[in-house]
Structures are given as C-alpha cells and as structure tokens.
Amino acid sequence: MENFTYHAPTKILFGKGQIANLRGEIPVGARVLMTYGGGSIRRNGVYEQVKAALQGFTVFEFGGIEPNPAYETLEKAIDLARESRIDFLLAVGGGSVIDGTKFVAAALRYQGDPWTILADRSTQEALTDAVPLGCVLTLPATGSEMNAGAVISRRTTGDKLAFHSPYVIPRFSVLDPLTTFSLPARQVANGVVDAFVHVTEQYLTFPVGAKVQDRFAEGLLQTLVEIGPQALQEPPDYAARANLMWAATMALNGLIGVGVPGDWATHMIGHELTAKHGLDHGQTLAIVLPAMLTVRRAEKRAKLLQYAARVWGITEGSEDARIDAAIAATRTFFERMGLPTHLSAYGISRDAVPSLLAKLKEHGMTALGEHQAVTLETSRRVLDLAA
Amino acid sequence: MENFTYHAPTKILFGKGQIANLRGEIPVGARVLMTYGGGSIRRNGVYEQVKAALQGFTVFEFGGIEPNPAYETLEKAIDLARESRIDFLLAVGGGSVIDGTKFVAAALRYQGDPWTILADRSTQEALTDAVPLGCVLTLPATGSEMNAGAVISRRTTGDKLAFHSPYVIPRFSVLDPLTTFSLPARQVANGVVDAFVHVTEQYLTFPVGAKVQDRFAEGLLQTLVEIGPQALQEPPDYAARANLMWAATMALNGLIGVGVPGDWATHMIGHELTAKHGLDHGQTLAIVLPAMLTVRRAEKRAKLLQYAARVWGITEGSEDARIDAAIAATRTFFERMGLPTHLSAYGISRDAVPSLLAKLKEHGMTALGEHQAVTLETSRRVLDLAA
C-alpha cells in the first residue's frame, strides 16, 4: 500500500426529512447564496423545503446552472455573489450544480482571472481559501458532495476541465433519497454508471495489496449491480434510492482511492466526448470503459481476474475467458441500465475520432492511466473499438 | 436504512515516515502536551521521531497512561495540563493512551467534577468544547484514532465506563505501520480480535437493507481473517501490518455503523470482565462473542446466515448447520490468533459469574443489544456458556 493522506471532513445528514436540519449547519447570520439548476427543484418541492430551512438567513438565489456547468454561467454567479457580499454558498442539485458552486467558492477568494484556476494546475495548488459551502444533493452520481473536485466546461472553446482544492470540500451535505424520486430514469441510470466507473477508475489498475480498499471497491460495485435495476423502478423504491445515494457518495469521497493507483483515462476521454458531442457524462463512460478494459487487458490482468471473481462470481474457464466474461458483464450491465455502449448508438461515427484525439492532445492528455501509458494511439484504439 | 449523521473529520496521515509530517497539523506556537504509555515508545524509536517532529513547539510530557487508562492517572495529567497552560494534546500510543487523552481534553474544558463526564450521560451531551488533540497511533485495535469515543477505568471502584463527544474527535492521526513492528504478538492478536468484534457489533444484528454498510463490514471481516495470521509473523510484514492498521481504523470510525442498528452487548460484558479480572480487552471479546452469538442466534438469524455465506463462504447444509459452522469458524479464528475463548482458560471459574452480573446491574447494563433484549438473565446464559 502506498502512503496517503485521507481527509473527508464533510458532515453528512442522510435520510428522509434531513433538509430541515441544514439550518443548524450554516453560521448564524450568514448571507447565503442558494444555487441551483434548471428549475426541477421548484417542481419537486425541494426548493420550498430549502427555503423553509433557510428562514432567518439573508438568502440570495442563482438558478440556471446547467449540466456540465458552463464557465460562462458561473461568471455571472460570481458577480452576483460579489455584489451581494455572500459568505456562505448552498448548492441545491446534482453534481453539476455542486461543481459549479465549488468553482464560484474558489473564484470569490481568488484575485486573478478565474479561468486560470481551471487551466493552470499551479494556480489550483496555490489557492488558500474559498467561501464555505454546503450541499443539498438531489442526484446521486458524481460524489462531488463529499470531495474536493469539480469539473467545469467552457462552451465558447469546447473545453471541459477539472480542478481540486481542499478549500471547496463541502462543510455539510444533505442526502435525502426522497429528493431523487422525481428524477427521469435516464438521470438515475447515468448516476449508477457514473458511480460504477468512479469505482473502477480506482480499482481496475494493478494490485498493491490494499485489501480494505479492494474489498470496499468490490462492495460498492456489487451494490450498484444489485440495486441499479431496482433504482429504475417506478414508483421509486426508497431502499434502492437510499443505497444508490450512499454508494455514489462513497464511490468518490477519497475512501477507496487512498494508497492505490488511479486510472481516470476513461473519464478524460469521456470528458472530450461530452465537450464535443454533448453526450451525458454517464453515457460517455458506458461507451469508453468496456473498450478501455479490452484494449488494456494485459496491464490490468490481475485486477480484471479479481474483478471477475469477486464482483461477478466468474471463476470458471481460462483466465482470458474470465476476463472476456467480466468485460461482457460490465457492458451488459450498462446496456441493461439503458445506456448503449457504442458511439454509433448515439449517432457518432468513426470519423469523429480524429477531432477527439486532437482535443485530448490540446489538453495534454497524452499519457493517461495508472502507468501513464495511455498515449493518443491507445486512445485511438479505444475510440475505434467503441465506435 | 435508518436516517443518520456521519462526520469523520480526522485527517489521516498514513504510511512510512509520516510522523515527521505531524508538525504541519499542529497550530503554530501551540503549547503541546505529549501523552504516552508505559515507555515502549522510548524503546522503539517513536519517542525520538515525535520529539523531532515537535521541534519549535513548547512541549510537555505525560507518560505512564496504562492499558485500560485509569481515571486516577488521568487526574494527574489534567493537573499538569492546567498548570502548563496546554492548548494542544498529542497522544502517542494505542487506544488506551488516546482514550485517556480524549478524557483529559474534555475535562480541561469542563468546569465540574470530571468523573461526571463518565458517570452521567447528560453531562457528556452537555459538553461544548475540548482541547484539540492529535494522535500518533502505535497499536491498531480500538479505532479511537478516528472517532468520538473513549473508555476509562476507575481502579478504586472497579468501574469501566465509556463517553462520547464530537469535541474529542482527533484533528489528525498519524498511522505509520512501522510503529507496530515492535509490538508483542499478544497485542497484535488482541488488536485483530478487537477490530473484528467492532465490526460484528455493527453488522451481526438484523437486516435493514443497508447494502453498502453490510458490504464494507464484510470486507473488513474478510480482510482481518486473511491478514490476522500474517500480522503475527516475525519478522513483521509491512503489508499485513498496514492492512491491519487501516482495517482497525475503518472498523470503528462510524462508517460501517451509519444507518444500521448496533449491538455492543459483547463489549459491555467484556468491560466488566476487564474491570473485575484484568483480562485484556481483546481476550474478553474472544470469550464473549461466540457465546453471545450462540445464545442470540434466533434474533440474529438472518445476519448470521449472511455472515456465514459472505465472510466464511459457508453455503451448504441446513440454516442451523450454517450458523453453527460460522460461529465455530469465528471461535477457531480467535483461538488461532492465540486468544482462548473460554473463561476457564484464563483461570476464571463459573463462580465469578454472579459478581459480574452484579456489576452489569450496577452500571445499568440490563437491556443491552440491538433490541435491548439482553437482560441480566441473557448475560448469565452467555457467561455460563463461555465458562
């Protein structure tokens, strides 16, 4: 096991009715900017619950943060927060709203051009502060509610870039599974696949003898396989939604990634697919992961065999047959969740590959993965196989 | 799944050489009281490493905190800390040193008689502050390095009582597996069993559909079963000690206990055995748990079957046979770790049972377990079976 630092200080308020308790987590007298997305929270009652919980605070609102939150939108939120002298941010929504709010939190306490927080790693590392933030999560998927990361897109340039800072880790997050009951099936399915691939990015690399992390990762994958289809049922099942919500948070709060290598090549290629073609994040992962595992099966051999046995119960046949079966099971699971696993199913042809590779190159994504061995040529093979 | 709050804000510095990094985690200019136990840290080099890391701080020392830390000893530490105007506590040792230091931290900011923090639950709940503390863990076992709890013994009265407060959660804990290399085999074995039973107390109750918590609990148990014997090997194996250290922390940092019922009857009876007969904490758990599971097999039936299948791979035979086999496997594991599972092996006869029951009664331990159904009569049956 490699040395590591683990710090996940977000306080989680989990369960039915917990929105009412968020008021106890915000400093008395705070000037709060409540951020949200396209307005679904106005239709499902979450907006009213949050407003009721915020009675007594000075509350401003910024709605309209879109999926794959746009830098251009967030600039307006930063302006509003500055003008309103905001000292606490409350993100109400899914990963996009939370990610966007994290960026606002950091930008408000940064003196230079906010874009450099995304474009320049040394700027990220030099951040020393952010406006404190809390979350009311309404879409289990990204894990942003309990981690230090955010991904922001710039529409005018087609960029989708990540940043990390310990200062934007949420102070608290409310996870009420009831808030997910009005989600469209597509978003629930995307969330299941997103959480699943967050786990594989930290698990399907090479063995380093980190037994607890491996078991936890396998437990999350088994849980997602078990509850994925149940989570799509209508009327919604509280138990399935609760397990999905907690699994998705645990998938990317740092816990299963400590002391082990990370891959993230699937995510990086997926980001370009979203930026260029507008696919949902979950869809891009469903497309890229099975092809990625196939192309890199040699370097991932030991962990793929462990994955086959422990997650899918595949223990019969030759090693290659077991790996084939595990990759096929992964693909079948994504398809069963309603996410096709080939570019063609989304109307994207093989001709699109060169421009995706060009964007990867532009973003310096030329040595991805746990061994930094995913070159542009490897990415080309992955995308060709996924076509 | 039940509603829950989860908050485990301790920053973990894990791995070889991490003691040197603790200086960055203590406020500049702090007056630090370094607490430790019987002096083993002077023999294994940890003392020197910590002192080196604390250069530049004003450091006081309090050694001699014994296993099952004594209230009488800690009173002296409180006096020293008051006189020395301490504003940070650094516990260097195992769970006893950390527990004792937590008590000192709370007592220093409490105006009344410190004993009431232990004896009176409403006093615990009324605590509003504690001196901040950090840890250098040298004995994986109790999980105290990442939680809010502590257990203190009063020698003059034979009491062993727990308290909990969010204010005594360590700010940071350094977990360097190398610090465990000089531990006697008995302490390593005790730690494995202690961590194992921490998990079963939160897992072997009744199903509430908390799939992630169940999988994580099972993953910790599987890990402990796998590495327990390896952790006893000499010369010590870094990988085994590292996995033990992380598993023991995860076993009692709140993670696997969120949203699920807790038992803790085994611990409560075990505490009386330690208080009355001086047995190691791990020994008491090894004695009580197999008997407890046998006596309460009806109410724990569903989880015992799940435990049999998922932790021990026992899937053949009748349900009763599988439960028998799982309890037998648990007992064999403890014995294999060098911890006998009957009172008689420690020279304690059945005649000791009545006075143990009297102490349970005195401490109000008359309705223990996940259904509060472990009466004194149940405890008597457990102790008789364990005789």
Image: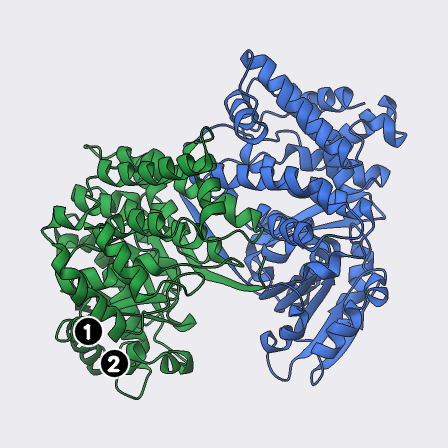
Chain colours: A green, B blue
Chain letter of disc 1 in the image: A
Q: Is residue B159 left or right of residue B209?
A: right
Specify whether disc 1 shares its chain with disc 2: yes
Type of amino acid under label 1: Tyr
Q: Residue placed at 39% from the left, 82% from the top?
A: A122
At mark 2, the secondary structure is: helix
Q: Residue A71 has which mark?
A: 1
The span from disc 1 to disc 2 (Cα, nearest Å) is: 8 Å
Asked whether residue B143 appears in the rendered view, the answer is: yes
Q: Is residue A23 above or below residue B154?
A: below
Q: Residue B312 has which mark?
A: none
Q: Residues within 10 Å of mark 1 (few under 14, many from 20)?
A: many
Q: Which residue is mark 2?
A: A115
At mark 1, the secondary structure is: helix
Observer-nearest of A33 and B80: A33
Q: Quadrant of residue B33?
A: bottom right
Q: Is residue A294 left or right of residue B121?
A: left
Q: Residue placed at 60% from the left, 61% from the top?
A: B168
Task: Please state the horizontal and vertical placement of residue B83, each as a whole percent of the image.
Answer: 77, 76
Residues marked 1 and 2 touching at CB (< 8 Å): yes
Type of amino acid under label 2: Trp
Q: Residue placed at 78% from the left, 60% from the top?
A: B74
Observer-nearest of B302 and B216: B216
Judged from this view, the residue extending furthest toward the right is: B347
Q: Name the quarter where the N terminus of chain A is drawn.
A: bottom right
Q: Quadrant of residue A242?
A: top left
Chain letter of disc 2 in the image: A
- Count of labels shown? 2
Q: Is residue B252 above or below residue B197?
A: below
N-terminal of the pair, mark 1 or mark 2, is 1
Task: Please state the horizontal and vertical placement of residue B300, each as a whole percent of the image.
Answer: 55, 23
